[in-house]
Image: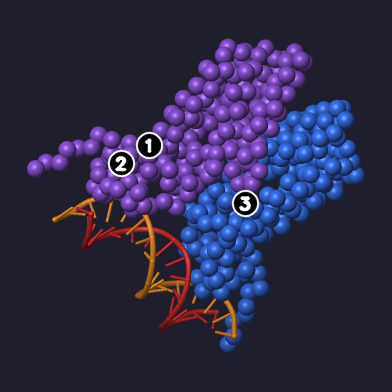
Chain colours: A blue, B purple, C orange, D red
DNA sequence: GTCTATAAGGGGATAGAC
DNA sequence: GTCTATCCCCTTATAGAC
């Protein structure tokens, strides 16, 4: 008698793997641990993800999509004002950094951990970083400031700094401070225009 | 006939290990590779460093000392003005980030890579991060601005952002921009006081 | 027919022995 | 300086349960 296939298996495995990868790092998590936490057999994992690299790439790609969607949602919820939209972007980052157990952006951490360049995960992560800067630049362009590139660089540096504060014991307080910081940067650039 | 002990062996091994760890990451470098590049036998390596953890800890500790010394030197060379000293600190970071082959701060990368907290390397890295912020705070205190903690946080965020730009293709240009940025932050804070 | 459980192959790592 | 013991990890193969 045939056993029913589990249509949620792939998502469940990916959920478990993402949680492990995010909390302890990709290199520190073995396939056996993913299998254990997912409560499935090794065979099922390897049919859905032929190798660990594929599992990691799926994890990174899904995170990237979620992150892009969250940033789009934050911008949309901020209305039509580019200033409010930019601040919403900074706030979204600040909230992520403040979450308990946050250990740095998974995509940036992957680039730090990964020895080889040019692989699937590598391209996903680098594309995300480039897209993130482009997203900032588009909003800054709508501000009408004198030197949009300078402001974009500074806001990008600010967001990078936020994300790099994963190991800072005070990281939970940094989000609101970063928003205020960004606010002043935007207003100063506008006043100078 | 007994062979003379090489007094420079330990330093040479550490040099080789540091170069490998910095360029490819600690996890991606094996002890065999260190032995090969150092041109020594395995025995010698293991007499100086009983385990890979010890070698890594020595590497991190030496980097921390060098980094502290470089920052002290930059501050000293800047004279007595706290403003010039702060900018010298930012410039020192910017120059490191711009170096070819820079792949992120070894201490921060270690924290990202390392699975276990509380070990030797972990404590070295966290102490360095705390000390670095303290160094900024001491200089900011001498500026006499209205809100020294706010300025310290912002400068720290700026330096963190610089260091986090390891994967940014434009990272070489970020250093000078960061110095200008810091300059404006300091001057604005002073003008408000 | 689909999944779980277990064992085993193949490679590479640390670490110790000689 | 080589050689080996031991271990861990990814991956595949096999056998059995539902």
**Position of residue A64 measured from the top left corner of the image (x, y, whole percent):** 69, 55
Determine whether the residue tagged by mark 2 lies in a helix, strand or loop.
loop
Residue B58 disc label: 1
The answer to whether mark 2 and mark 1 are in CB contact below 8 A is: yes
Q: Secondary structure at mark 1?
A: helix
Density class for disc 3 (Cα within 10 Å; few <14, some 14-19, many ≥20) is many
Q: Is residue B72 left or right of residue B191?
A: left
Q: Do pointers 2 and 3 mark residues of a single chain? A: no
Residue at point 68%, 55% (across, down): A127
Q: Determine the chain carrying the residue at label 3.
A: A
Percent x, y of residue A191? 87, 27
The structure residue drawn at horizontal position 89% and vertical position 44%, both measured from the top left corner, is A79
Point 50% across, 33% down: residue: B126
Residue for badge 3? A107
Q: Write the residue at 62% across / 63% down.
A: A58
Q: Which residue is mark 2?
A: B49
Looking at the rendered structure, the number of numbered marks drawn on it comes to 3
For the residues marked 2 and 1, what is the alpha-carbon distance in whole angstroms?
9 Å
- Please tell me whether residue B165 is drawn above or below residue B80 in the rendered image: below
Q: Nearer the viewer, residue A37 or B126?
A: B126
Label 2 or label 1, whichever comes before in sequence order? 2
């Amino acid at each position: 008698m045939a056993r029913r296939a589990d249509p949620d298996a792939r998502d469940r495995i990916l959920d478990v793997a993402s949680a492990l990868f995010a909390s302890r790092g990709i290199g520190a998590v073995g396939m056996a641990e993913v299998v254990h936490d997912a409560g499935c057999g090794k065979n099922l994992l390897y049919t859905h993800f032929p190798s660990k690299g594929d599992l990691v790439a799926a994890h990174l790609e899904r995170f990237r999509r979620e992150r892009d969607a969250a940033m789009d949602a934050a911008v949309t919820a901020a209305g039509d004002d580019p200033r409010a939209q930019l601040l919403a972007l900074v706030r979204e980052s600040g909230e992520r950094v403040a979450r308990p157990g946050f250990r740095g952006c998974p995509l940036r951490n992957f680039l730090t951990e990964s020895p080889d360049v040019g692989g699937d995960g590598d391209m996903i992560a680098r594309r995300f970083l480039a897209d993130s800067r482009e997203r900032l630049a588009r909003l800054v362009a709508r501000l009408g400031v004198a030197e949009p590139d300078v402001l974009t660089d500074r806001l990008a540096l600010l967001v990078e700094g936020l994300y790099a504060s994963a190991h800072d014991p005070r990281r939970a307080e940094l989000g609101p401070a970063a928003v205020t910081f960004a606010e002043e940067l935007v207003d100063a650039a506008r006043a100078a225009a």
